[in-house]
Amino acid sequence: MNKDKELLDRISMREKDAFDQLTQKYTFYLHRLISRSIHNPREAEILLTEIFKSIWKSPQHYSREKHVSVGITKACLQMVDKKVGKSPVGQKPSPMQ
């Protein structure tokens, strides 16, 4: 079993240390991914927090992919798409403008 899947298994048992390790590993990466579409730093931080809350609530959801990083990335991009679709704040300007 790889380390990320092991961390998710521990998170499902509500081990805070495992959650902290996963958070440390993915925070920078996810923040950069979010910031490409959401340019408001406050909104980006809120979304990042929502992603980690989702991981805490349903860690098994993120271990369905072969690699945990793929599951986390997909979920992050889906949340970004929803957020950008709901609010014009943080949207990239249209190339037609």
Image: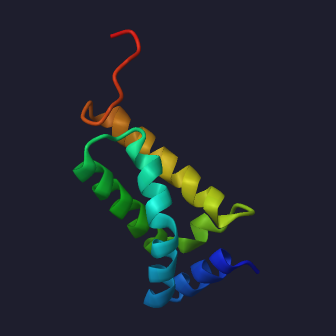
Residue displayed at 56% across by 59% down: 72
Residue displayed at 53% across by 89% down: 13
Position of residue 14 measured from the top left corner of the image (x, y, whole percent) = 47, 88
Question: Would you say 24 lies left or right of 59 here?
Answer: left
Q: Name the one closer to the observer, 53 or 19.
A: 19
Q: Is residue 43 visible?
A: yes
Q: Is residue 14 visible?
A: no
Position of residue 80 measured from the top left corner of the image (x, y, whole percent) = 42, 44
Tally of numbered tags: 0
Which image quarter holds the N terminus?
Answer: bottom right
| Vertical comparison of 48 with 60: above or below | above
Position of residue 89 measured from the top left corner of the image (x, y, whole percent) = 24, 35
| Vertical comparison of 28 with 22: above or below | above
Residue displayed at 70% across by 64% down: 67
| Vertical comparison of 81 with 32: above or below | above
Question: Would you say 97 lies left or right of 69 here?
Answer: left
**What colour-coding does the image apply?**
rainbow
Q: Name the one closer to the observer, 13 or 47.
A: 47
Position of residue 44 measured from the top left corner of the image (x, y, whole percent) = 32, 51
Which image quarter holds the C terminus?
Answer: top left
Residue displayed at 50% across by 46% down: 77
Residue, far top? 96
